Amino acid sequence: MRLTTKTPHPTPPTKPYTLLKPRCITITQPSKPTHTNNLHLSNDTRQAALQLEKIINLENHNSGTNFPSMQSYQKTEKLGKRWKEYQGMSNWDGLLDPLDENLRAEILRYGHFVEAAYKSFEFDPSSPNYANSRFPKTTLFERCGLPNTGYKVTKHLRATSGIQLPSWVRKAPTWVATQSSYVGYVAVCDNKEKIKRLGRRDVVVAFRGTTTCLEWLENFRASLTNLPFPCSSKRAFEDNDIRDGSRAMVESGFLSLYTSSIPTNSSSMSLQEMMKLEISRILETYNDESSPLSLTVTGHSLGAALATLTAYDIKTAFPKLPVTVISFGGPRVGDRSFRCQLERQGTKVLRIVNSDDVITKVPGFVFDDDVVSDQGVHVAGVPSWIQKRVEEAPWVYSEVGRELRLCSRDSPYLGNTNVATCHELNTYLHLVDGFVSSACPFRASAKRFIRQ
C-alpha cells in the first residue's frame, strides 16, 4: 500500500518573487521544536523510525506527487570567482539566513542530480535488471528529465552489503538476496558555457537512498566502529589521533556498504575503490586545464551518509581537491573525532535538515555536540569523567558541517504530513524552494508545489 499526502491543489502565485521584498505566507501552526542534544531517543521516535524504514522504499519515487519541470530550477546566476563561497569555503557564512538566491539554486540543482539517481534505479524486483541502472551513461540525464545539465555521466556506482548471507538465501527472491546494487553515478561538467558560469569544472557524485533489503539491514547496524585509514595518509591521521586521544568512528552499516565487495567475485570492487579510481582518472584527464576543478558529493538519506564518507575518503586521498557535501535528510554518520577530522582536512558539509524528519535524529544520540572536551570544557552539572565515558560509548554521534534547518509545518501546501512524507526528497526540495529566512520561513511565490 502506498501512502500519499492529500493536500489541496495550490493556486500558483500571480506576482513574481523579488529579493528585496519577499512576501511571506503566514499560517497558524504549533511552535517549531528547537534543536536539543538529547541523551536518548523516546520509544515513539524509535517506532517512527522503524515504521519509516518499512514504508519509505518506493515513496520517494512513486508517491504520486508531481512537480514542474526540473529544467525550471537549473538557472543559477553566474558564480564566477565566488564559486568557492558557494562551495562552503567560508562555511556559507551570510548565505543561509536569509537564504541566498544563488545558493538556493545550487542546492536545488544538486537535489535534481540525486533525483536522477533514484529515477535511473530499477525498482521492479521481477525485472532481470533489478537493482541496476535503467539507463546507460550516455542517455541517463535525458531519460531522467535533465537534458541540459552540461554534465556527462562517466561512471555508474555500486554499493555492496558486507552482511554474510546463509546458503539458503540463494533460493530466496531476488529482492531479498541482492547483495550489490546501483547506488548512484559520477558526472563531469563538460560544457564550456556551464564551466564559465560555474567558475570551475565541477565533478558531481550523486547517491540515492536505501532501496534494497540488505541496505535496510545495514542501516540497522547502528553501533560505531573504527574508521580504517587510507594508506596514503595513515601517518598524518595517526598524529592527529595522538592529539585527539581517540580514533575516528563511524556507523558500522554505512562503512560496510562503502568498503565491502563480493568476496566470491574477483572482479568485484567496493564503492570506495570505484570512487578513488574514477576521481584519480578524472584528475589525470583534466590536470593541464586552466579552469579549477571541484568535487561536489550529494545524496539523500542513506545517500547522504555515503556522500559524507566518500568526501572524507577522497579529500584524504587528494588533499588539494576542493570537496563539498550537499546532503538531504541524512542520518548521523560518525562521532566527534570523525567530525574533527572532516573539519581539519577542509571538507565542507552542508546538511539540509527537516526538523520533522526522524531519520535526521538517528542513529544513536548526540551528547553536547558543541562542546570540545579536549579544551577542558565540560557539560554544566556533568562530571568530566562521566562526560568522557558517555562520549566513548558506541552510540554517541556528532553532527557534521553546517546545517540549513527547515520545517514541514512552515509550508501551507504540505498539511498534516506523515513520517514518510517528511523524509521524501521531494519534500526537501519543496522546502528549500520556499524558505526565505528564520523570520519569513516560507515565501508566497515558491515555484515547487506538491500536487496530487
Image (cartoon, grey):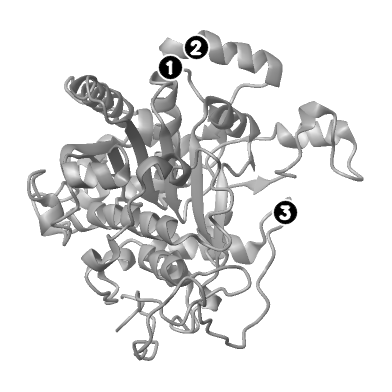
| Distance between the alpha carbons at the discs numbered 3 and 2 | 34 Å
Disc 2: which residue: 234
Q: Nearer the viewer, mark 3 or mark 2?
A: 2
Relative vertical location of residue 207 with respect to residue 356 in this rendering, above or below: above
The answer to whether the residues at label 2 and label 1 have Cβ atoms under 8 Å apart is yes
Helix, strand or loop under label 2: helix
In this view, 371 is above or below 110: above
Residue labelled with disc 1: 230
Q: Secondary structure at mark 1?
A: loop
Q: Residue at x 33, y 45 (%)?
A: 214
Q: Quadrant of the N terminus?
A: bottom left
Task: Name the residue furthest top.
Answer: 235
Tell me the kind of residue under disc 3: Asn
Residue 178 visible in the shown view: no
Looking at the image, tell me whether mark 3 or mark 1 is earlier in sequence order: 3
Residue 405 versus residue 46: which sits nearer the camera?
Answer: 405
